[in-house]
Structures are given as structure tokens and as C-alpha cells.
Amino acid sequence: MTQKIKSKDFVIRFAGEGGQGLVTSADAMARAATGAGFYCQTFSTFPSQIMGGPASSQVRISTTPVLSNGDAVDVLVVLNQYAFDNHIQDLSENGVCIYNAQDCEPSGEGNYFGINADELAKESGNTRAANMVILGAVATLIDFKIESIENFVRERFSRGRDNDEEIISSNIVAIGLGVDVAKKSGFSVGSLDDPIPPDYEQIMITGNAALSLGSTSAGLDSYYGYPISPATTILIWMEQNLINKGKFVFQVASEIEAINNIVGAGFSGKKAMTATAGPGIALMSEGLGLAWMAEIPCVVVDIQRGGPATGLPTKSEQSDLFACMFPAHGDVRLPVLAPGSVEECFYVGELSVNWAERYQGPVMVMGEFSLAERSENIRKPDLSKVIDERRNSNTGTNGYKRYQSWEGELSPMPIPGGEVAYVANGSEHDEIGDTTHLPKHHIRLTERRFAKLGLLNDAPYEIENPDSDIAIMPWGSSKGVAREAYDKLTDKGEKISWVYSVALNPLPEEIIEQLKSKKLVIVPELNYQGQWSSILRMEGINAVSVTQYTGLPFKPTELSEKILEKIKEAGV
């Protein structure tokens, strides 16, 4: 029997095959825990096929806000032998594994015990309650209040149907059967400290849903999307929620159709968006170049996955930065926003559609698989404070100089159908949009297109301990785990600055000044080439990357060790 310990957080993983309800089990545990006042973050990894293939889903439950999916696993639930063989090494020192006694036979002795959840579910009177049996056993191992699981069941199945009470009762019986098995096993992982519930209202939401909610709250009018992992859930969310009068959602036949549709919608005066993954960005290159050249507002969301080609459709990577910041031929450098948490996804959704309107051009949003599918309990956004920013529109007469020289303010944008003729020209053009190849116009308008980026100066950023010679600067989805690694290092006495920006282009001036003052900037990122540090070096910043390209996120302890190695190598 393992020693019972008090802990501020536990990691619980469910592993088996796709289609076995692993995500459902982790989500149920997370929702029960958030209902009890804890903070939670889920993480899933699964193959691209609909059914079968190795998959896992986990939840980290904590008394404080969760920054990452953690290091080792405290409770491991495996549903077959393959899952046991490939996940048991991730078990923590005091961790316990529950295995499916029907499909798994571990050899030797260890911190594990079997459970026949399907048979116990039959005893409960509900053959579909096997996951509740397992949740009862898991809760017992971490000394989690069973009442919280039962409360979740009551809330989940109170749907106003005749058989609600029957389903609730059988699930509660199933939970109790799991509790009995776990108690008889003699194992205990420990006990969670008492929760400190937040003093604000929360919602449990995924990254993709939060981004969708943010953009629609800021007045998104049109969404065009092609189903592609891991962006499809944004399309589904929009189909279900962007339904009011004057709103339009359409499932297109290709990524090329998607980009052309949002350029057309932006041209006609609408706030327009699409979401895709790396393969779609490759197909959108020409359309993004047109939107940049003709100065048409639109938003493209890239939910990154492993690449290139089909690559790893359901795995995590941050390898599309070059493709998103410089997507078209010629001199192009698009605005890029990269949320680092589920909560930031909401505000980036809002900011992206407003940025597109303000500077009159395309905006890129860079998410990533694990962030898109992750659920977290976050502060409920105050929708009354969301801004619906609209472009300045011209209602003058013909001869209006839409593309006049840049003087710090952006000329209003005519809307087709009004009195002002408007040509959205993909060729280089003069002040009124007529095609020209004269060098003076190409020079003037190239400088104008880049100068407009200066209007995008309100993205949130973070700077801490600014006087250090060394800084950690993560981007996007690696923010949380980098912050956890940073906290570990500073707790040990390392003198390091924390620098972070939601906007990768344009970078806030304060961030640029801070980075250029450093002798070394360390960038954790999930790609092979060290893409963000490469771009920072273009700006004269001494940046190096800590890279990982396994298809999985960093682990905080491993990342902190790699950061320390970079510091020692640099001799700073």
C-alpha cells in the first residue's frame, strides 16, 4: 500500500483506443472537479481515424490555476495491454494504475490493480455506465469527494426526460461499485488539498470554442470553413451559433474557396473569418496575398498540427509560423496573433476581427491542436465589454483616393454598392486603385502596407523581472508550460526575465526594447527549425530555441532542465 500524501494537484490519464470514451471520462472528471471548486485542464491525443488506434485523454486537477498538463501521471487508467505497455512508464513514484481486467494482464507486481468495469456496469443496471465505475475508483484513489461526482451526474442527466432519474440512479450505483473495488485494492495515491474556489464566475470551455465565442461577440458576420483537423470544431460551433439575422455560415468545398469567400465578404463590408490547418494555409497563399495587396479585412485562423503534407493531423506542433507570417510571394508580413491559453483564445478572437477592420487587411491567428481541444475552467468573459470595431467607410464621390499616401491615418474604405467606385486590385495600383507599374507607386504603396501595421498596438503582453540579462520568451500554446518551467527556475534562484506577447507581429515596442537589451533570449517552441527565434534574430535579437517535435507538448520539468542547459552553454 502506497503512503497517503497531501497534494495540490493530481494528473489522471485514461488510455486505450479511439472510440472507447476516453475524452468523455476525462471531461467528466474535470467537470466534477470544477464543480467542487478546483481548477482543471484537459489534454487529449488520438489518431486521425474515427475509431481505433492508440489514444489517451487526461485531466490535471489543482487547487491553483493549471498552466500545463504536468509531468508524471498520478492515476493511470488503461483499457488494453497496449495502453499499459506504452503509458506505465509515465506513472509517478506514488502513482497507481487501474487496468481493464478483460483486456489487460500485467506481469509481475506493481502499483496496479484490475477492474472489470463492463461487468460492474451490468450490475448497476446500466450497461453504458462503465466509465462511471472507473470514475468511482479514480476518485477513491485521490480521496476525491464522491458527492462531487454524483452532483456532476445529476446535473449532466437532468434533461427533463421521463427516464432521467433511472439513469441518474444507475450511474450513482456504478460509481459506488468502483469505489468498492478501489478500497479493496488497498492502494491510495494521496489526497487533494481543500480547494480554494475562485471568487468569480467561471465557464468550462475549449480553446476553439473560446476563440469562436470571442470573434462572434466582436461582431463577426460571416464564416466560411472547410472541415480539416483540428479546426473543424470551429466550423461546427459557427454552424450552431452564428445564426442571427444578417449572419452567414457556409461549409465550402475547398480551402481555396474558403479564402476567396472571406476576401469577398471583407470586400463587401462584412467581418469575415475562416479556420484551417497547415495544409489549408498552403492553399490560401495567393488569396492572402490578394487581401494584403488590395487591403481587404479578413481573418484566417490556423489551428496548427504536425506537418508537412498530411503529417500528424491530430498532434501538436508550432511549425507554421513562417507560413503564417510570410504566406505570400513578394514583400508580405501579416499581423499574427497567437493565444497562449484558453482564456486568451477568447480575447484573440475578439482582437483579430477588430484588427482586420482597423488596418484594413488580413490577420492571422495561430492556435494549435492541444490548445484547441483543451478544456479549462476560465473566468467568464464579460460580453458587455467586448468591442465591435468597424472600418471607417467612405461615402463621398468618385475620384476618391482610396490608396493615398500614408500620413499616420488610414483613408476610409468604400463599400461596393455605395456612390464611390472601388476597385480591389491585386495588381499594383495608384491612389484610386487603377493598375500601374510605375516604380514610385510600388515604393509608396509597399511602404503604406507595412506602415499600417503601426495601428495594431493594443495586444496584451507581459514583462517580469526586466533587469536580468536572460529572458524566456515562449509563444502561443507553449506559454503555460514555459511559465511553469520559469517558476521552477526562479524558485531555485535563477535570475531570468519573463517576456511574452500575444502579438508576434507587430511586436509591442516595449517587448522589442526588452528583448534587444538581453544577452540571451530563450524560446521554447514545438518545431524543429526554431522558427520564432529565427524571426527574432532577423530583428537583431540574440535568440535561441529549445525545440521539441514529438507531436506532444513540453513537460515542465524537462523544459526547465533544457532551459538551464541553454543558459550554461551560453555562459551568460
Image (tube, rainbow, N blue to C red):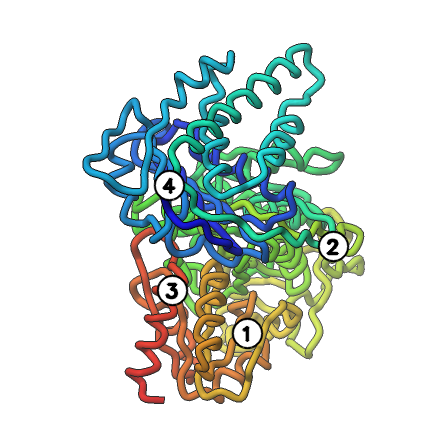
Query: Is label 1 or label 4 in front?
Result: 4
Q: SS for tag 4? A: strand
Name the residue rendered at 64%, 11% in the picture: 163
Nearer-N-terminus badge (1/4)? 4
Q: Amino acid at mark 4?
A: Leu
Q: Amino acid at mark 1?
A: Leu
CB of mark 3 within 8 Å of CB of mark 1? no
CA gap, disc 2 and disc 4: 32 Å
Q: Residue at label 2?
A: 199
CA gap, disc 3 and disc 4: 20 Å
CA gap, disc 1 and disc 2: 33 Å
Q: Residue at label 3?
A: 557
Q: Nearer the viewer, residue 560 or 275?
A: 560
Q: Position of residue 272 (x, y in %)?
A: 62, 47
Image quarter hosting the C terminus: bottom left
Q: SS for tag 1? A: loop
Q: Residue at label 4?
A: 76
CA gap, disc 2 and disc 3: 30 Å
Image quadrant of residue 465?
bottom right
CB of mark 2 within 8 Å of CB of mark 3? no
Q: Which mark is residue 507?
A: 1
